[in-house]
Image (cartoon, helix red, strand yellow):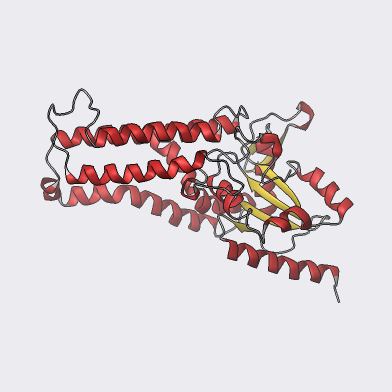
Amino acid sequence: MALTLVIVSFSCTGPILGSLLGSAVTGSSDVPMLLTFALAGFGLSWAIVFGLLALFPQALQSLPKSGGWMNTVKVVLGFIELALALKFLSKADLVSKTFLLKRELFIALWIIITLGLVLYLFGIIRFPHDDKKPKISNTRKVFGVLSVGFLVYLIQGLIPSERPKLQMLSGILPPLNVSYFHNEKDGILGMHPEHDYFKAVELAQKENKPILIDFTGYGCENCRKMEEFVWSEADILPILQNDVVLASLYVDDKEELPAEQQTKIDMGGGQMKKIKTIGDRWSMFQQVNFNNNSQPHYVLVTPDGKVINTPVSGYMPKEDLNNFWNAASIGLNNRNNPS
């Protein structure tokens, strides 16, 4: 379970450690100190609870006594684990490009799980280890009411709409184009980004447009949140559709490169990195050229590959993205008018 927890939780460290590890590739002198502080912080957050209990063992006596409530907690967590299992199954489905777990099916399964949780919390269904005559506590009723509210919230996600819904679950749900009402080949919000940087360069040179490099991933939750609730904004979408060539490079794409394109890169210190998949290619491209390994990561470049303004990482509200475009416009004008 400890190994499972580490594997599942590690992706959450990406925004912090991604930049540090990306800098490590370039051999920056301050990386060892930054890595030490960052990893010490993660270690402390895990150890502090156990350390405090070891220093103050009498605190253990104040913990609640065992009883029927423990079985209730166990069952509730069981329902939650079922829901989260679907989340990770969806990520595997996306990375493998099978696209079997559609958005509507995912929501429907979560509705069924939530309905089961509601029925259990109100005592309508019981499990073998529950008390024979359980008394429904006020706490259990409160969680039952909250679960009903979440159930109602989920149902609206099954209704087709031109605007994205269920913002609270953005990134957890499959993307908008993995749907029974759309096709994964329909692109994102009607756009068809290039998935090869070099093809994007050719198109940008032909159309005389800058390239927005979008380092993304099938399993990246903040990437989906950006696409669904920031890219879709009325003052953002036209820029992506008309003013730039969008290059979405998936760093977790497991499709193997043709044999002649597979290679090895010398990372220094006797370490060799094998570039075997499409994801390997774009991940290393991001690390080597932009000293970063977190997603989403946005870089605006000219058709000849010159960076226009400071790249940005992570989820950005619409206001911050507008500032990014404004700075890009200034940078682009300065390059077009050197005087």
Q: Is residue 308 above or below residue 232?
A: below
Q: Nearer the viewer, residue 175 or 282?
A: 175
Name the image quarter holding the N terminus: top left
Q: Residue at x 67, y 61 (%)?
A: 235
Q: Residue at x 53, y 40 (%)?
A: 159
Return the x and y of residue 283 as percentages of the image width and height: 65, 43
Return the x and y of residue 225 as percentages of the image width and height: 55, 49
The answer to whether residue 158 is left or right of residue 5 is right
Q: On the image, which quarter does residue 181 sit in?
A: top right
The answer to whether residue 270 is left or right of residue 47 is right
Residue 328 at least partly seen: yes
Return the x and y of residue 97 as percentages of the image width and height: 63, 30
Return the x and y of residue 69 as percentages of the image width and height: 17, 37
Q: Nearer the viewer, residue 137 or 7?
A: 137
The outermost residue toward the top is 128
Q: Residue at x 37, y 49 (%)?
A: 43
Q: Nearer the viewer, residue 147 or 83?
A: 147
Q: Is residue 144 above or below residue 34?
A: above
